[in-house]
């Protein structure tokens, strides 16, 4: 509301993801790779392995180019993109953790200085001092992760910070330590994976074999413990948040399956490298790195998806819209925007008055303000396909907008704005994918009717009150669906005809039968 919206047609979230995933894939290598360098140098000097030291010198040049150059540029890229796409969230993170960021930047300065001295000190420093620079880099890099991890995890599990706004309340939040352990294991694994890239171009087969075996010992155990650390991490996420991620729109859990698959493939490829370690090819090591990138990208996507629609959980949506009003935060709560109107609250809008002629134009403005942080019209999480699939006309879209906060297991934020603004948004969304009234009421089979009209908020499960309590008498149940607002005041006032009501009740009763049988088998409980 306080800032102009940067309209990214294919999805603002995807733009951040592309920049951020590449950055974290390199930044975690920067953390684990520093330890790999100094420990491997110590090992080589103790055994007087000149060939390993020569390779390590080449690998350190590759390390500095990737981590210091690309890592620094992509880090700036993250600040640039989040500053444009989520300016309020960026401002909140800076104000809440200004000293945390300042400390992290000091660690980063020490980190890059030590890395450059380590690289250029191979032939100029005595071994002991050279390794000391390596250890300084290693400690600074890890402390950088320690600080950033507190700020990143705070966005998902903000804990008691919402009540007291205290630095440490948000920093040491419920997922802080699980995430730190998880990311530490990733950093150690990536140290070995990146080492395989430079090892694979070595001509000396015996040297290559030694490097591969050594690197696998860094990678395989770290990958093996990730499932347990991931389970610990998930256990610390609030149950309702994880349940929402597993609801009717389980984006996060779909990528959880992909992450598990890619993690398994990564581990299998790492172990496969031991079969013929002296003949590992560059193409194999690059494939391994690509699969590892996919696994890490899936994890980062899960972390972001679980938190949605919040930028800071239970506190801040996009565009300066707060879940609740907290004095001094400078934004608007959903209740305040609903009372005043989104067009009057937002500082960057082109049209503030709604007329009969500008409904679609105003609706597009509201879509940009309230929906574009998660959705596009017809690309990533596009509403065009969603609306067309359910055959919603303008009237049904408007009815559904009144209960957004109940959709998809409660993961959607409530609509913030006046009734007139809600109507304008419905007009825009219906214009995105026009649906005739005849098409909207064409469905006759119970399953289709349920999926088009009910599945956004209800699941075929006894945990759902509607499914559990709907009268088993088909005629009475169908009659109770005549006016949904009697069942629950915030239900959309959908107008299903008698045949449609009977069809959906009959289908629900068929789905309910296995549950009833299971309940009877347990003595009627449940």
Image: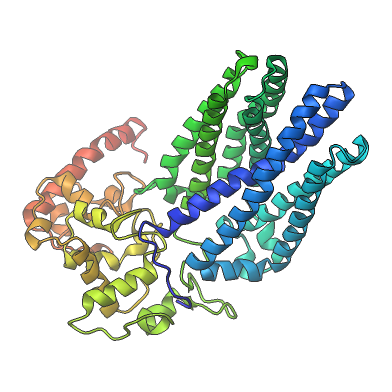
Which residue is pictured at 72% across the width and 52% down the height?
Answer: 144
The residue that appears at 61% across and 66% down in the rendered structure is: 93
Q: Residue at x 25, y 57 (%)?
A: 384
Seen from the viewer's position, the closer of residues 332 and 461 is 332
Residue 197's image quarter?
Answer: top right
Residue 301: x and y in percent read 48, 47
Total number of numbered discs in the rendering: 0
Quadrant that contains the C terminus: top left
Is 162 placed above or below 78 here? below
Q: Is residue 228 left or right of residue 48?
A: left
Quadrant for the N terminus in the image? bottom left
Q: Nearer the viewer, residue 112 or 370?
A: 112
Q: Which scheme is used to colour this image of the protein?
A: rainbow
Near-viewer residue (438 or 5): 5
Report the residue at 28% width, 53% height from top. 466
Among the 4 quarters of the image, the one containing residue 171: bottom right
Q: Position of residue 372 (x, y in %)?
A: 38, 64
* Residue 43 seen in render: yes
Residue 164 horizontal side relative to residue 248, left or right: right
Where residue 45 appears, as percent x and y from the top left, is 87, 26
Which sits in the foreground, 126 or 488? 126
For residue 358, above or below residue 215: below
| Residue 392, placed above or below residue 395 | above
Is any atom of residue 505 visible in this view? no
**Percent x, y of residue 65:** 67, 44
- Please tell me in which quadrant of the rendered image residue 47 appears: top right
User: Left or right: 294 with respect to 483?
Assistant: right
């Amino acid at each position: 509301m306080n800032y102009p919206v940067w309209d990214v047609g294919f999805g603002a979230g995807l733009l951040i993801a592309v920049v951020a995933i590449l950055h974290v894939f390199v930044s975690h290598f920067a953390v684990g790779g520093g330890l790999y360098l100094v420990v491997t140098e110590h090992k080589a000097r103790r055994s007087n392995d000149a060939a390993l030291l020569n390779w390590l010198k080449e690998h350190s040049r590759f390390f500095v180019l990737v981590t210091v150059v690309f890592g620094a540029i992509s880090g700036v890229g993250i600040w640039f993109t989040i500053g444009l796409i989520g300016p309020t969230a960026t401002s909140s993170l800076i104000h809440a953790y200004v000293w945390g960021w300042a400390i992290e930047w000091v660690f980063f300065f020490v980190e890059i200085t030590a890395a450059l001295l380590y690289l250029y000190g191979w032939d100029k420093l005595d071994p002991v001092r050279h390794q000391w620079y390596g250890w300084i880099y290693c400690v600074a890099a890890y402390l950088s992760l320690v600080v950033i991890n507190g700020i990143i995890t705070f966005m998902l599990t903000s804990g008691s910070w919402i009540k007291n706004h205290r630095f440490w309340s948000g920093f040491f939040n419920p997922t802080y330590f699980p995430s730190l352990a998880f990311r530490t294991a990733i950093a150690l694994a990536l140290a070995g994976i990146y080492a395989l890239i430079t090892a694979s171009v070595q001509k000396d087969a015996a040297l290559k074999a030694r490097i591969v075996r050594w690197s696998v010992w860094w990678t395989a155990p770290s990958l093996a413990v990730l499932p347990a650390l991931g389970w610990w991490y998930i256990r610390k996420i609030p149950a309702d948040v994880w349940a929402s991620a597993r609801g009717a729109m389980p984006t996060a859990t779909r990528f959880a399956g992909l992450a598990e698959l890619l993690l398994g493939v990564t581990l299998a490829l790492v172990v496969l490298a031991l079969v013929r370690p002296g003949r590992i090819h560059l193409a194999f090591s690059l494939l391994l790195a690509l699969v590892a990138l996919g696994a890490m990208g899936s994890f980062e996507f899960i972390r972001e998806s679980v938190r949605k629609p919040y930028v800071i959980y239970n506190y801040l949506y996009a565009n300066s819209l707060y879940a609740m009003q907290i004095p001094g935060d400078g934004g608007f709560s959903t209740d305040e925007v609903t009372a005043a109107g989104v067009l009057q609250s937002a500082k960057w809008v082109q049209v503030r008055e709604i007329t009969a002629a500008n409904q679609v134009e105003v609706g597009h403005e509201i879509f940009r303000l309230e929906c574009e942080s998660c959705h596009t019209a017809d690309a990533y999480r596009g509403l065009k396909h969603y609306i067309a699939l359910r055959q919603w006309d303008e009237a049904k879209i408007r009815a559904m907008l009144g209960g957004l906060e109940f959709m998809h297991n409660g993961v959607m934020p409530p609509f913030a704005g006046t009734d007139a603004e809600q109507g304008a948004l419905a007009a825009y969304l219906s214009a995105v994918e026009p649906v005739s009234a005849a098409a909207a009421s064409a469905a006759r089979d119970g399953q289709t009717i349920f999926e088009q009209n009910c599945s956004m908020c209800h699941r075929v499960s006894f945990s759902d009150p509607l499914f559990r309590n709907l009268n088993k008498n088909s005629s009475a149940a169908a009659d109770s669906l005549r006016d949904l607002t009697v069942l629950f005041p915030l239900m959309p006032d959908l107008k299903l005809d008698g045949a449609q009501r009977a069809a959906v009740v009959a289908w629900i009763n068929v789905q309910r039968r296995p549950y009833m049988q299971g309940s009877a088998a347990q003595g009627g409980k449940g």
